[in-house]
Image (cartoon, helix red, strand yellow):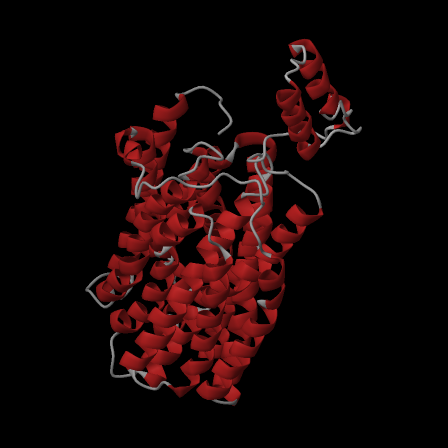
Amino acid sequence: MGRAVWPPTHGNRISVAQRDVESGEQRPQVELAQFDNEARVPQSRVSLPSRPLSEPPNGGSQARAHALAGVCVIFNCWGVNLAFGVFQEYYSNWLLWKHSQSQVAWIGSVQLALIFLLAVPVGKIFDAGIFRMVFIPGAMIMISGQFLLCMCDQWWSLFLVQGIMMGIGMGMVFMSGTLCLMTYWKDNLSAAMGLGAAGAPIGGIVYTLVARALLRYKSFKVTCLVMGAIMAVTMIPPVIIYKPYPGRAKGTKQIIDWGIFGEPSYMLMTMGMFFSFLGLYFGFYYIIVYGTDVLGMFPMEASNLLIAMLGANIVGRIVPICISVRCLGPLNTLIPCLFFSSMLMYMWMGTSNRHALYVIACVYGFTAAGVQSLFTPTISAFGVHGSPTMGVRMGVAMMAIGVAALIGAPIGGKLLGLSGQTPFYFAQVFAGTALMIGFVCVTASRLLKVGWGPEKI
């Protein structure tokens, strides 16, 4: 009888068994077992992962590269919208002078709202394991819209291109990019997202400076082309680098995690986000218009108010994040930011000179930055990290934010001109009250989740 060749292979074991049957011999079971065990690779030679595949790496070159590339993503998705105050003044006083402030505000608010409203569909697609087929087309749509904007000179064309087309591209890029970044970080997620969030005010300052200079000395067409070129160049690193961590958990087939509607703390947090973003962007959109129409400032000088606000916004993206990571947690840090943002909006009502308005703009830019940088980590704090429905759970809250962003600035524009101490009086009351309601709701959600104790969350 032939002997097995070492090391044994699958084919050798079959041939040995066949010869045993033909010869009528019965090989002892212990020998077969010993034969089988010897064929296995020793346990000490198997390289086991140090963490589950779904656990984020929480560091490393890839994670840091994604965090840095996130600066470019937010630089474009949010920087362009934060600079819309320049276009609000230019459209209402020059290009679209026949249209009201509220009608002009719909262009920027639709663009902003679509960033959030696409959160659920994009989040669901991401949960299914699809990323680059969303991220790259979204970047192409956003960049193409910025270039096409140079051909627009009517309200409906500006609304379709700057509002809807660019908003869809920004929504696809921002939501998929945010979820991609979250697959690389867990313990330091707030720090990673805070670094990316710093790109928003930087982008806002860059695009504001470009727009105010070129709109004044060149033309609207040149302005759009230059901004499109900046956007195209700065989106190259994210398109090359961004890809989800390969060990992340995949989503389930359900459309919505219905259990979230039975969580009072999550629902109050979502309601708080709605009211917060209902009033948050009023200052960014109308600070230049307030300077020109109420204080009589020239447009070039008034745009410095927005630049000062965005400059303070950079510091405000860093300091609250550091406090959140080291001391309090995102939710505990968000609560005072909402309170002081509301108070500053009320203080703005009594501002009658440009020096005081500069102070209000800087301090509001700082406190509002805390809300803008902490809302995503706060939403994730109400879920389970690594959950297969993480994208949809965050998407529901972002849909509420999107609806608020859609209607907030137009409502504020509609309230302009009503009889009051100033033409902005009732619009400022609206924005300040919305922020205060958001503060109350988010504080209540914190109490329901962890109580009055000094819990870091």
Task: Give above or below for 226 relative to 231.
Answer: below
Residue furthest toward the right? 6
Percent across and percent down for residue 127 are 43, 45
Q: Is residue 209 left or right of residue 114?
A: right
Spot occupied by residue 210 in the image (x, y as percentages of width and height): 54, 77
Q: Is residue 432 visible?
A: no
In this rendered view, identify the residue nearer to me: 445 or 361: 445
| Near-viewer residue (230 or 315) | 230
Q: Nearer the viewer, residue 368 or 375?
A: 375
Where is residue 283, by image quadrant?
bottom left
Q: In the orientation shown, which residue stands out farthest toward the left?
A: 419
Q: Residue at x 33, y 69 (%)?
A: 164
Question: Compared to 323, does 289 lie above or below?
Answer: below
The residue located at (41%, 60%) in the rendering is: 171
Say which quadrant the N terminus sits in: top right
Residue at coordinates 30% horizontally, 85% vertically from top-left?
A: 154
- Which residue of the protein is positioned furthest toward the bottom in this rendering? 218
The quadrant in which residue 442 appears is top left
Q: Position of residue 327 (x, y in %)?
A: 58, 30
Q: From what the image shows, is residue 263 above or below residue 320? A: above
Count of numbered labels shown in the rendering: 0
Whether residue 328 sits left or right of residue 158 in the image: it is right
Vertical relation: 30 (above or below) 104: above
Q: Name the side, left or right, on which 225 lies relative to 27.
A: left
Q: Is residue 408 visible?
A: yes
Where residue 328 sits in the image (x, y, percent)?
53, 31
Q: What residue lies at 46% left-to-right and 77% top-to-bottom? A: 144
